[in-house]
Amino acid sequence: MSVKYGWVGNFFEDFEVGDVHKHPVGRTVTEAENIWFTLLTCNTNMNHINIEYSKKTEFGTYLFNSGLTLAIINGLTVADISENAVANLGFDEVRLPAPVFVGDTLFAESTIIGKRPSKSRPYAGIVEVSTRGYKQDDTTVITYRRAAMIYTREGSPRFKPAADGAPVPGAPTPGR
């Protein structure tokens, strides 16, 4: 019997400018999370929390909170883009060309648009991506650019032994 390790994400050296990552997980959005997120963030726009108000708008129903749309789409990209991030460095050019409604299923794809070694951290590099979020009918609902600092395979804490020198439990070796 052999041990099979799960996906550990991409490291800085795995990214190539021009690569397109079609993120495999889709996510259906719900009424409860729309209301909870809206209230948690102190957003008082009635389009997100009052169905009777929303029925009178051009949409005729709840408009899904765009802040949560960004959070979900970005979350769908993590396994492929930033699983091994030191940190996100910025989000730019966020656009919301079409609405999202309760019951829509969201998907994401990201294109690598830039890559360079970090000047301040030799164990990491900067990766820039352009992400498109879309729903079940392929309608684009959000686009944005993001920069993240990503560990190199060698620099990743994922493969470093514990302070007492013991190996990291369950960590695969740094090869692919």
Image (cartoon, rainbow, N blue to C red):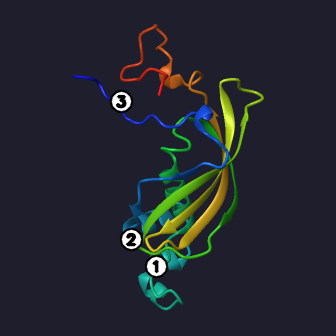
In the rendering, at what x and y percent does residue 45 appear?
56, 75
**Gap between marks 3 and 2 measured at Cα:** 36 Å
Helix, strand, or loop for circle 2? helix
Q: Dot 3, crowdedness within 10 Å: few (<14), some or many (≥20)?
A: few
- Amino acid type, callout 2: Glu
- Amino acid type, callout 1: Tyr
Against 126, is 170 above or below?
above
For label 3, the residue is: 5
Identify which residue, 102 or 10, lies in the foreground.
Answer: 10
In the rendering, at what x and y percent does residue 169 appear?
37, 20
Indicate the quadrant where residue 17 lies: top right
- Amino acid type, callout 3: Tyr
Helix, strand, or loop for circle 1? loop
In the rendering, at what x and y percent does residue 149 appear?
65, 37
- Which residue appears at 51% of the width and 46% of the height? 78
- Sequence-wise first label, 1 or 3: 3
As drawn, is 110 to the left or to the right of 93? left
**Gap between marks 1 and 2 measured at Cα:** 8 Å
For label 1, the residue is: 62
In the rendering, at what x and y percent does residue 94 appear?
67, 63
- Sequence-wise first label, 1 or 2: 2
As drawn, is 76 to the left or to the right of 117? left
Quadrant position of the N terminus in the picture: top left
For label 2, the residue is: 31
Q: Dot 2, crowdedness within 10 Å: few (<14), some or many (≥20)?
A: some
Q: Contact, CB < 8 Å: mark 1 with mark 2?
A: yes
**Gap between marks 1 and 3 measured at Cα:** 42 Å
